Each structure stands twice: as C-alpha cells, then as structure tokens.
Amino acid sequence: MEKMLMKGNEALAEAAIRAGCKCFFGYPITPQTEVAAYLSRQLPKNGGVFLQAESEVAAINMVYGAAAAGVRTMTSSSSPGISLKAEGISYLCGADLPCVIINVQRGGPGLGGIQPSQADYWQATKALGHGDSRVFVYAPNSVQEMVNLVVIAFDKADEYRVPAMILADGLLGQMMEPVSFPEISANKTEKPWATDGHGNNRPHNIANSLYLKPDVLENSIWERDSRYKQMEMTETMADYYCCDDAEIVVAAYGASSRICKSAVKAARDQGIKAGLFRPVTLFPFPKNELKTACRNAKKVLTVEMSTGQMVEDVKLALECKIPVEFYGRTGGIIPTPDEVLAEIKKLNENKGE
Amino acid sequence: MTDNILIAGFGGQGILFAGKILVYAGMASGKEVSWLPSYGPEMRGGTCNCSVVISDEPIGSPLVITPDVLIALNTPSLEKFINNVKPGGVVLIDTTMCDAKVTREDVKVFALPATEMADTNDLKGGANIILLGKLLGETKILTEEAFAKAVEKVVPISKPKLRENDMRALTLGMQY
C-alpha cells in the first residue's frame, strides 16, 4: 500500500468516506475546517451528501435525521461548536442512534483560542449531553490513527447503537504524516430499527427520546446502561511503550502522548526506568490495561494539554494505590519533551517517598 | 538520526510549500517524516512557520522547538528563532528580506540573497526553493533525486513550467 502525505483532518475525512459515511453535516470552525472542506469536494463524488448547515445545532439535528434513516453519518467541529451540539448528542443517545462526531479540540472555555488543546476530556467522557448518556470516545495520536479509529468508530457506533466521538486536537488535525488506507471491509450491522420506509410490511419505526412514563424511561435507561457496561468489558483499547519494568509510568493520550514518548525515550537514555501508557479509548477507559502497565510503577505522571482532567480516571483505575502526579500546559500551549522529562526526573528522584 | 527543521517567514513566501517539498523528499528517501504548520490568523504578510521532522525512527513530537536547521526568510523570524537553534546547527538566511546579523558563533550560517536571485532569474517567489537548494548543497541532508521526486509529487503534472522552475531554483541554491 503506497503511503500518502495528508493532513490529519483530510485523512480522517477520506477514511470516513471509505468507511461508508454517506451524509456529512457541519459548520466551519478552526482547526477542523479541512474535514468539511475535503468532504465538500469528495463526498458528493462518492454518492454521499455534504451539507453545510446554518449552525452547529442544525448540523447535529440533521445527523439525527440521517442516523434515524439508518445511514452512516458524521459531523465535525471544534470545542465551542461541540458545546452547541450537546443537546442534539443527548437526543441521539436517547434515541439510540449511531453516528460519528469529530472534535478537533482547541483552547477553551468560551471561544478560547484556536491552538491545540485537550481540555474537552471531561465533556467528552463524562457528560457530552444531559441524562444518563455516554458516547464512545476514541483518541488518535497520529494521522494514521485518525484513519484507523474513524473506521472503528463507525463500526462500534452501529454495533452498540451509541454515538462515537473522535477526540482529536488542532495538532493532529493540522499536521501531515505519511498515511495508508487499508482495505476496509464494510462491516454492515443490520438496522431493523431504521426509519427507512415500512412498505406496508411492518409497523412504523420511530426515532424518539421522549418517554413520559418514568418506569418505561427507567427501563430504557437501564437497557442502554447495560450496553455501556458491555463496552467497558470488551471495547477498551490502549497502547504501551517500555512499561514492562517501568517505575515511572507516564499516562497520556492523543497529541501529548507523542511528546511524552520523546520524553520517555530520553529518560531511558539517561537510565531512568520510565514507560508510557496511552489510552486509545477514553470512554470506555482502559482500567485493566493501565493496571497492567503500572505493575512495577512507583509513581504515575499524567500529562495533558489541560489543567488535569484525566487524572481522576487514572487514580480511580489504580484505586489510588500508586501516587498520581500531573503535568500539563493549557490554553493552546503544547508541552515540550524537555518539560516532561524534567517532571519524570523529579519523580524518579522522589520515587521512594 | 533525526533532523528537526524550522522554516519561517511571511505568509506568501512559500514557507509551507518548502516544508512539503522537504517531507516528500524525506519520504522518498524512506525516512519517517512529519509536517506541522503554524495555523490561525496568519495570512499573506503575517508571520508563518512550519515544523518539519525527518528521522530514521518513528517521530515523537512533530513540533520543532530547538531546530537543527533554521531557514529564515525575514527579519522577525530570524530574531525570534535564532537563539533556539541547537549548538552546531545550521541557519540559512534570505539576506534580501532579512538584515539582522547572527552573533552566535556556535551555529553554521549560510546567508544568500535568495529573493533577489529568484527575481533576477525569472523565478519570482522561488526564494524558498533556492534556500532548500543551499541546504541540500551544504548538508547533504537528502539527495537531489529525492528532491526531484518531491517536486514531482507536490507540483501537479499539468504545470510542467512550475516543476522546471522549482528544479532550476534548487540548482541555483545548490551552486551558490
């Protein structure tokens, strides 16, 4: 397979087409605009619909319609735009409609800035919308993973009838790397619930999230929750680097995991037993994988481009048995490998405490 | 072996394009590569820079903070980044656009009037490629064949004149 050089945003868009995405609805925002720009050119040529909506709110509700009709559909935005989509995402969850939502994160809160950030971790993993709702959250750390994970996201969303989010950031969206597009076998999940015409052969299908009787609503929520539990059992993904004998384990995802890998490599060169644990799914969070990575750890360092949002998940997964420290930059600043290395060295000196 | 390269100048000088040529050339040489633009409010006339990493190993951080090679196409870029260049590093300067002097003695400086050379050789806008030519000539960072392949990849086949100009600019820089 010949490798091409592509921006993360464009590679992701191309992968969505190959994964069978037929409807894209979006609204421009830096730093994700290349996703929409690419799809505006390429999706119509591949038998799909590209539509620039009048707003983020409109776009996510168009996704609701397409998803209800059983079509593979996607929207993309960046942090402030995702907040606008929150209501629609909750409705998609409530109606058990699969779709893929891209968040190429930028600095927040509010309009924030336009440089890379990871400050939407809590929003993505804990409460993307109201109610007892969750979504799959995949965190790529390379242009190749922007491709691979979007394919998985479409498959898993259909399989579980749960929306899936790709939580990227401005760095991954804007950078170019060599990428290849593996042969994609369209993993088609049957959708007997789709509102795609009953042909007088079956009752109407209705895509709905309104249940006025509390007992009926409760039952629907527990049923959905059992799928979230199943996701936690079988759908976690993680990556390890030098963790086998690591005394200092750095936990980082997405773009910051790349900076941490450089730092861990440099620490190893200096004789420090450092390792890197990288969650690829942020929800479900790979708890057991983290425990395995930390089996020889004396200290854990979480590194994020935020004020420390993943720290809680790391502490919970480790049942607070290993001290978890944090280093981060936020507001669009990317931590440097040297900064992370300095933190690793500091922890290594105090690892006995 | 990892080469961290930073190209910086005004928007419109072909900063990102020069970066693309470099990464494609790196790829054609079987190396790992990454390309990261500064993005945002930059536009024609604003400041612009591009991080390129060419390595024998998988690339960690794609953001170049302490470059092995700095290519500066204007004064503000040189002033902003000169102190970040690694000791022993290489600095290429377009002296037509940049009148600042380098006082550091621990870096190798190659100064050439790239924009003027481009203008007098009917290669308007080719200063970026002339500087890449100089880099190629002085450091052997990549081969000329790899650059030729990169030009073929980046410049569409429908624009043979542009391809020819880029190769001419590359040779001009190499021979300076």
Image (tube, coloured by chain):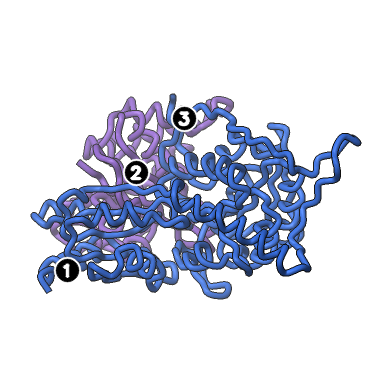
Chain colours: A blue, B purple
Badges 3 and 2: C-beta atoms under 8 Å apart?
no
Which residue matches tag 1? A347
Tell me how far mark 1 sits from mark 2, CA to CA: 44 Å
In this rendering, position of residue A195 left or right of residue A11: right
The chain letter under disc 2 is B
Which of marks 2 and 3 precedes in the sequence? Answer: 2
- Report the amino acid beneath label 3: Lys
Image quadrant assignment for residue B174: top left
Which residue matches tag 2? B131
Instruction: Please provide percent x and percent y for residue A190.
Output: 67, 35
Estimate how packed mark 1 is, as few (under 14), some (14 to 19) or many (20 or more) residues with alpha carbons within 10 Å. Answer: some
Tell me how far mark 3 sits from mark 1, CA to CA: 47 Å
Which residue matches tag 3? B153
Q: Is residue A46 above or below residue B40?
A: above
Estimate how packed mark 2 is, as few (under 14), some (14 to 19) or many (20 or more) residues with alpha carbons within 10 Å. Answer: many
- Which residue lies at the image location 23% right of the left edge and 50% below the top edge? B68
- The outermost residue toward the right is A200
- Report the amino acid beneath label 2: Leu
The reply to whether label 3 and label 1 mark residues of one chain is no
In this rendering, position of residue A317 left or right of residue A282: left
Select label 3 or label 2 by which is in front: 3
The chain letter under disc 3 is B
Tell me how far mark 3 sits from mark 2, CA to CA: 19 Å
